[in-house]
Image: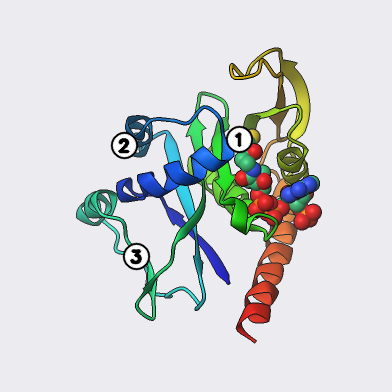
Amino acid sequence: MYYFTEPMAEADIPRVQEIESQSFTTPWSANTYRRELQNTSACRYIVARASYTPPSATPRPRGLFATFFANLFSPQVVSNGVVAPIVGYGGVWLTVDEAHVTTIAVDPQHRGRSVGELLLVGLIDSAMQLRAPMLTLEVRVSNTAAQNLYLKYGFRPQGTRPRYYTDNGEDALVMWTDRIDTPEYQNRLTELRQRLFARLRAQAERVVN
Ligand SMILES: CC(C)(COP(=O)(O)OP(=O)(O)OC[C@H]1O[C@@H](n2cnc3c(N)ncnc32)[C@H](O)[C@@H]1OP(=O)(O)O)[C@@H](O)C(=O)NCCC(=O)NCCS
């Protein structure tokens, strides 16, 4: 299985909401997603897709109209005529001093195959495009899988927000990266990215052979 990411489009929202309902107890409305997608100066949302064949190398069209149409209709990435389904999604939101990871989730059937990591790398890249110096997020204190993913990419616990989650009153752990524009962080990211892509390639070849 080949996994790859691309910008989320409005037409992707129903599938994103399906994954969301399998992952979180307090889902966002479709309108919330629409507003986030329209806020292109401060928000970046991406989806991960799965394909049995390598994704097309054809670059996506750029420019005002291309962006407009891409947001109206899903790009429906095809490889050999097959639509690659969405298996995960994530987003960042730029505030004054940092990029906030607002959400990240992977279809339960595709977890443990580096899709979450691929999405997080995409979100860190998005934060760099938005010129955010650091990233931050909240995560349930019980969510060790997500915390391990964030620790791997240099997020560190910096405190808690008591009873942050309204469904069960659970505390949130607040995590921050150091500055992401330093050579140290960039070198670490390059190393992690290389290992991730090697793992994804090996995984894809195992399924094909
Ligand atoms: C958190 C989540 C996005 C991780 O996605 P994933 O595709 O399963 O994770 P990956 O396969 O990319 O794993 C990347 C890293 O995450 C950590 N991790 C993932 N699953 C884990 C698990 N079950 N136990 C412990 N650590 C885990 C590991 O550090 C792993 O790196 P490693 O392979 O070098 O050990 C996914 O579990 C999910 O969608 N959970 C529900 C939604 C959610 O909790 N989102 C986070 C909100 S803050």
Counting from the top left corner in percent of width and height, residue 52 is at: 52, 76
Between the residue at mark 2 and the residue at mark 3, the CA separation in whole angstroms equals 19 Å
Of residues 135 and 150, the one nearer the viewer is 150
199, 16: nearer the viewer: 16
What residue is disc 3 on? 60
Q: Looking at the image, is mark 2 or mark 3 earlier in the sequence?
A: 2
Q: Position of residue 181 (x, y in %)?
A: 64, 43
Who is closer to the viewer here, 64 or 104?
104
Q: Under tag 2, what secondary structure?
A: helix
- Tell which residue pokes out farthest to the top in this image: 162
Residue occupying image coordinates x 50% and y 38%: 21
| Lower position in the chain sequence, tag 3 or tag 1 | 3
Instruction: Identify which amino acid the numbered label 1 is placed on.
Output: Pro
Label ID, residue 168: none
Q: Position of residue 99 (x, y in %)?
A: 55, 33
- Residue type at tag 3: Arg
Closer to the chain start, of discs 1 and 2, is 2
Q: Position of residue 209 (x, y in %)?
A: 65, 87
Label 2 close to label 3 by CB (< 8 Å): no
Kind of element beneath mark 1: loop
State which quarter of the image contains the N terminus.
bottom right
Please name which of the two marks, 3 or 1, marks the residue nearer to the observer. 3
List the residue tagged with mark 2.
Answer: 38
Q: How many marks?
A: 3
Q: Is mark 1 within 8 Å of ligand 1?
A: no
Task: Indicate the secondary structure of the residue bearing disc 3.
Answer: loop
Q: Is residue 48 above or below residue 197?
A: above
Q: Quadrant of residue 160?
A: top right
For label 1, the residue is 133
